[in-house]
Image (spheres, helix red, strand yellow):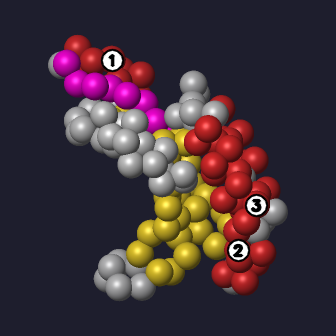
Amino acid sequence: MVAWAEYKFQAKVRGAMALELFVVISTPANSTVHVKEFLTEHLAYQAEMERAGHLACAGPLSDETGTQMEGAGLIIYRADSLHDAKELADADPMHSSGARTYVLRRWLVNEGSGIQGRTLSDEETTLS
């Protein structure tokens, strides 16, 4: 195992992007009925986080076969620290209500082109 800070430093030395983001894997705590109760508040929170620049991407995940929606979701936050990302995840109505639980991880983005200049919740289609 390697210390995260050391790995991030070495990635930068290699010339990698080394952009640190925070990944939340969110799953229903019990039934999806409770999840549906907080969907409107959750989506409003996601849009607010997007406008504030904290939300990079979010959306549901399929099951392992790719054919069914099982209720899990993925959220990628921009934050200054793991602590700040945890505060963002905790404040999501899905998590604060207990409808969903989550696992939070640091993610070091080293390669890729990404989606830039697009506000996904507003469905704007301007790409840069």
Q: Which mark is residue 41?
A: 3
Q: Residue 35, position in %: x, y?
A: 70, 74
Determine crowd level at label 1: few under 14, some 14-19, many 20+ residues with C-alpha closer than 10 A: few
Residue type marked 2? Val
Say which residue label 2 marks.
Answer: 35
Q: First in sequence: mark 2 or mark 1?
A: 1
Q: Residue 48, position in %: x, y?
A: 68, 44
Residue type marked 1? Phe
Residue furthest toward the left?
A: 14
Q: CA distance from mark 1 to mark 3?
A: 38 Å
Mark in front: 1 vs 3: 3
Q: Which mark is residue 43?
A: none
Residue type marked 3? Glu
Instruction: Name the image quarter holding residue 80.
Output: top right
Asked if one can make out residue 95 in the rendered structure from this viewpoint, the answer is no
Determine crowd level at label 3: few under 14, some 14-19, many 20+ residues with C-alpha closer than 10 A: some
19 falls in the magenta region: yes
Determine contact: label 2, label 3, CB under 8 Å: no
